[in-house]
């Protein structure tokens, strides 16, 4: 009999397991995949840590979280500075003075602000009814057309005119030449990859892989006093109220016989015609000097049962359905629902850790 059965060997489950172990509790961690670390799993190819489920850049303003993860991994100084490719034109992201100079030839912040304000006045949008109007009212038409529209429509699989305005609450406009996308106080990538970070969190805890919790729930529940469940909340309840919606991502990964394919870890393709949303060149996350390189093209897709769920569709319909599932979850005795899927929430990694630490303190004392 274990104190906790932890369903999912991702970041939330691993942090909870670490805290439970420190509190003298026994845990069994299971995962239906054949590896630990969930979607932050990194796999070594030709000496390069490949982010198998998309790029993950650790960033936080929470010093406690930063100190916590540094107990389990050494982080490098990587700063996320993506580049946007619009039909061969390259722009810096976030939108900053480099972007505005390339877009309009302006050289001072005052000129950039004046250009944006001019386009906002021309659009004359006072109450944005959709994402397109929201974006134009924030950044003007040029930035919207070249750097927002195509990428967003590929991400969501529908026109910006059909997407709700709240998806883009704000567009960060920086009137400096700073290319730091996150602008977070602490930022970096584990030198040995995220899998090593999670392995260190799980050290001393029993882990069983290739175990499908929902396929053998009754037997597995009997192994522990309490369950920490980090899978999809609707799947836990057999989808009895209907399916929550997600966006999914498909990856095409290639090993190339060149030392440098695109010169940057992340290049977003913001035109509508390019079918993928971005290309990741993994070695640049850790300043790799290997003679070969690995790239991944990312294709956004509509989720269907059996696909890997990535991004919750946080619209009004899904929000209402989640609240119904949350009510069912709250009524479950001795079950904790946590993480991106268990809480149907888009979580950055630092927030996952915050949430897991908070829940661990609450239940472990």
Image (spheres, helix red, strand yellow):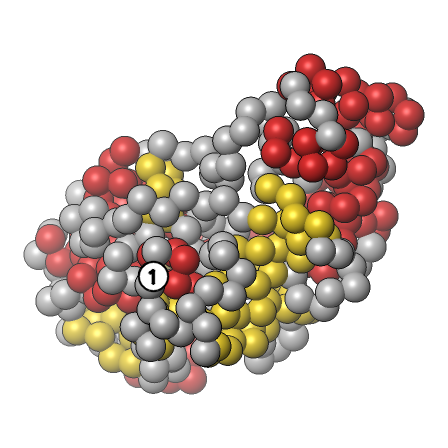
Give SS at disc 1.
loop
The correct choice, above or below, for 129 with respect to 73 in the image is above
Residue at 61% x, 77% y is 305
Give the residue at the far top of this rendering: 110
Disc 1 residue crowd, few under 14, some 14–19, many 20+, Cα 10 Å: some
Question: Is residue 334 among what the camera can see?
Answer: no
Q: Is residue 199 left or right of residue 282?
A: left
The correct choice, above or below, for 253 with respect to 70 in the image is below
Quadrant, the N terminus: bottom left
Residue 341 in picture, x, y percent from top left? 48, 61
Say which of 355 and 35 sits in front.
Answer: 35
Q: Is residue 251 left or right of residue 364?
A: right
Residue 283 in picture, x, y percent from top left? 39, 63
Q: Is residue 246 left or right of residue 8?
A: right
Say which of 73 and 23 sits in front.
Answer: 73
Say which of 292 and 52 sits in front.
Answer: 292
The picture quadrant where one finds residue 175 is: top right
Quadrant, the C terminus: top left
Question: Is residue 291 among what the camera can see?
Answer: yes
Residue at 13% x, 58% y is 21
Give the residue at the far left of this rendering: 24
Residue at 55% x, 73% y is 251
Say which of 350 and 234 sits in front.
Answer: 350
Q: How many marks?
A: 1
The picture quadrant where one finds residue 191 is: bottom left
Residue 316 in picture, x, y percent from top left? 70, 48
Residue 183 in picture, x, y percent from top left? 45, 33
Residue at 50% x, 31% y is 178
Q: Is residue 26 left or right of residue 253?
A: left
Q: Which residue is mark 1?
A: 288
């Amino acid at each position: 009999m274990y104190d906790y059965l932890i369903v999912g060997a991702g970041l939330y489950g691993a942090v909870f397991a670490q805290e439970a172990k420190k509190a003298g509790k026994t845990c069994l961690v299971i995962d239906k995949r054949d590896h630990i670390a969930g979607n932050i799993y990194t796999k070594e190819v030709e000496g390069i840590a490949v982010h198998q489920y998309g790029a993950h850049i650790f960033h936080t303003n929470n010093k406690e979280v930063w100190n916590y993860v540094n107990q389990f991994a050494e982080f490098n100084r990587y700063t996320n500075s993506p580049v946007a490719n619009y039909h061969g034109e390259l722009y810096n992201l976030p939108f900053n003075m480099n972007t505005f100079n390339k877009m309009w030839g302006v050289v001072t912040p005052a000129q950039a602000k004046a250009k944006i304000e001019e386009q906002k006045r021309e659009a004359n949008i006072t109450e944005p009814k959709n994402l397109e109007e929201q974006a134009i009212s924030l950044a003007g038409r040029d930035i919207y057309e070249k750097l927002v529209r195509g990428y967003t429509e590929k991400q969501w699989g529908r026109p910006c005119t059909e997407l709700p305005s709240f998806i883009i609450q704000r567009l960060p406009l920086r009137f400096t030449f700073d290319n730091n996308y996150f602008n977070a106080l602490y930022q970096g990538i584990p030198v040995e990859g995220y899998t090593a970070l999670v392995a260190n969190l799980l050290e001393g805890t029993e882990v069983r892989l290739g175990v499908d919790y929902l396929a053998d729930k009754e037997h597995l529940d009997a192994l522990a006093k309490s369950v920490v469940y980090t899978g999809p909340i609707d799947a836990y309840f057999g989808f009895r109220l209907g399916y929550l919606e997600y966006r999914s991502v498909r990856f095409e990964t290639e090993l190339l016989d060149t030392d440098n394919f695109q010169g940057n870890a992340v290049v977003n393709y913001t035109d509508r015609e390019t079918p993928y949303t971005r290309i990741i060149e993994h070695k640049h996350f850790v300043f790799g000097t290997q003679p070969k390189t690995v790239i991944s093209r990312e294709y956004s897709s509509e989720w269907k049962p059996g696909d890997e769920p990535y991004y919750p569709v946080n619209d009004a319909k899904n929000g209402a359905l989640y609240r119904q599932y949350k009510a069912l979850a709250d009524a479950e005795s001795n079950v904790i629902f946590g993480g991106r899927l268990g809480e149907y929430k888009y979580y950055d990694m630092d927030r996952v850790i915050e949430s897991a630490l908070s829940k661990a303190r609450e239940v472990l004392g």
